[in-house]
Image (spheres, helix red, strand yellow):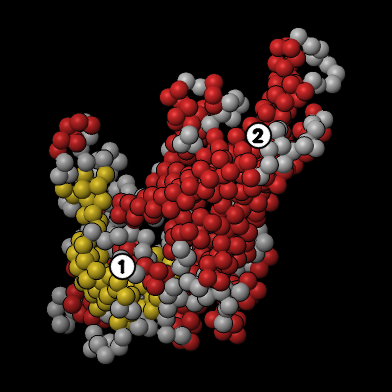
Amino acid sequence: MTTTECREIALAVEGVSKVFVSDGRKSKPTTEDTESPLPWFARLTGRKRRVKHVVNNVTLHAVKGEALGILGPNGCGKSTLVRMISTLLIPDSGQIRVFGVDVATHPMQIKRVINRVSVDAAFFKKLSAMENLLYTARLYGLEARAAMDRATEILATLGFDPTNLRSSMEQLSRGQQQKVAIARAFLTSPTLVLLDEPTTGLDPKSRLEVAAFINDLRAKQEITLVLTTHDMKEAESLCDRIAILNHGRLVAIGTAQELKERARTTPDAPLPTLEEVFLKLAGERLEDADEVEAPGGE
Amino acid sequence: MVTAKKLEKSRYAAGSLAGECYAAYGFVERQFTLMKHYWLWEFMWILYSLSSSIAIGYGAKYMASAMSGGQIQGALSPAAQHLVIFMLIGSLLWGYLSGLFFDISNVVGWERWEGTIEYTFMAPISRITQILGMCGFSMIYGVGRTLLMLTSVALVFHLDLSHANIPGAMLVLAVGSFSFMGLGTLVAVFPLMSAERGTQITGIVEGAMLLFSGIYYKVEVLPVWMQVVSRLSPATFVLHGMRAALVDGVSTMALWPDIWPLIVSGAILIPLGLKVFSVGEQYCKKTGRLKRSG
């Protein structure tokens, strides 16, 4: 953090926790699960309500202009954390501040400066890419013509076939839809962008195009990125620092180099890969840590 | 990056009144665009609604003829004409009001299914803008659809509306629409909390209104306790006022007993609907119910 201490804090997550309660039918119990504090309810309904600590006392910061990666297996709490930052979930405890403003108490101020790409490209599937983007432009107060020009510009950079602009979203491939989702997020010129597994479903060429777009944008603007992924290479190439999350807990945070140094067994040993770092610091392999998602949240 | 600079100079800054109006227009435009893509479905729905209204009109004509012992074919007697208009207004108004009511809750359910509700909630707009935008579409489309149907049934049944107080009827409809906007917002919380079952619950509320509000009969035929309940439904006053204006040609001033309860119910239901929707939104944000996947 020596190079970032004097820069403005863009995102501050302080001791944030989130718990989801499920009826226990769909998810298998994990070490982080506890029984519901309502035993009378369980007796009444015949179901055991399971309390799942999805995000557990996480503290991390990102400075202005930084790209912070959040690395972890499925179900480790990455998306839940992103949803809490983007005002879609309310933390049970702790505080999240974006440019010094509390997300829970001043959500409208936060909404003006953030945007998000989720792993699932949610759109009105019957509408075309342009119609969906025009709708977003209107909600963010953007002039329609300028917004459409900007969207076309972003999509061209991402390698989106312009002949598909007028096609309905349901006719587009998963990768094409994801590119429109990325264009939607950047269309509104956010200063903090939350990229929740943005390249999932993209082919290798498209992944490179997305990475090039993000790097190009960062070179031109002081934009802060939070990127969740389980792609080690992507995290290493796009992020200044990486936070490792497992079972809702922050396991480690630092630059890729720092994390590798920390995981190195002896000073003379070669630097481990990020996969090996995860294995060492989290105490399990990335794929072993995957777990069934709990109903109601990750 | 020239266009990026142009974007920053938008006149409709998020949070300003112009920005909120612009966003509300965005909702109206989105709904019309969606409707354009589902035009065949909409066309079939209008045909179905029109068929239902005409069927109800013929039912009324038969009952009027049977009761008076007159001929079924030929010109309608004044009493028969009165009954036909009474039933048709009930049918057309119910189509408009239930459509408005259904559209608001259906849009929320639709957004939950598509997963776009998270993006709508992330946008820097107030909830009232969202609701007004959704209602704006429903009102414009609903009025257009109802006028088309009214013209069609008037032609089929040779209805004489020369003595009708049409401006007065429109006033009742306009004031009543606000109550339905509030009621629609109130029940939209159900599809917000449950995409699967929420819309069914709105159907229950709609059914209760159909029963208590005197859509196809005067509320005076109901048991006393049901008549008391009917006074709580804005649809009762809209129907009574519209029928008085269109069937009996009652003056606009004389419609006041129906208008003031609608003003009161609108003043209560809109803030109440927004409050309940807001509480529902907070609940969903606490329990993680907004997401569909990911």
The picture places residue B62, in percent across and down from the top left corner, at 73, 16
Quarter placement of the C terminus of chain B:
bottom left
Q: Please identify, in this view, whether the residue under mark 2 or under mark 1 is nearer the observer.
A: 2
Front residue of B178 and B276? B178
Q: Residue at x 16, y 41 (%)?
A: A38
Residue situated furthest right in the rendering: B74
Q: Residues within 10 Å of mark 1 (few under 14, many from 20)?
A: few
Can you say whether B290 is above or below B119 in the image? above
State yes or no: discs 2 and 1 in contact (Cβ < 8 Å).
no
Residue depicted at 25% across the width and 47% down the height: A21
Q: Position of residue A96 (x, y in %)?
A: 28, 70
* Secondary structure of the residue carrying numbered label 1: loop
Please tell me which residue is depicted at 72% across the width and 43% down the height of the picture: B166
Q: Which residue is mark 2?
A: B243
Badge 1: chain ID: A
Q: For mark 2, name the chain.
A: B
| Neighbour tally class for label 2: few under 14, some 14-19, many 20 plus, Cα within 10 Å | many
Q: What's under tag 2, amino acid-wise?
A: Arg
Q: Residue tagged by mark 1?
A: A105
Depth check: give the residue in front, B158 or A139.
B158
Looking at the picture, how far across and down is residue A139, in whole percent?
A: 53, 66
- Mark 2 and mark 1: span between their CA atoms? 49 Å
Q: Measured along the vertical axis of the image, is residue A85 above or below residue B150?
A: below
For the question of whether residue A257 can be seen, the reply is yes
Count of numbered badges drawn on the protein: 2
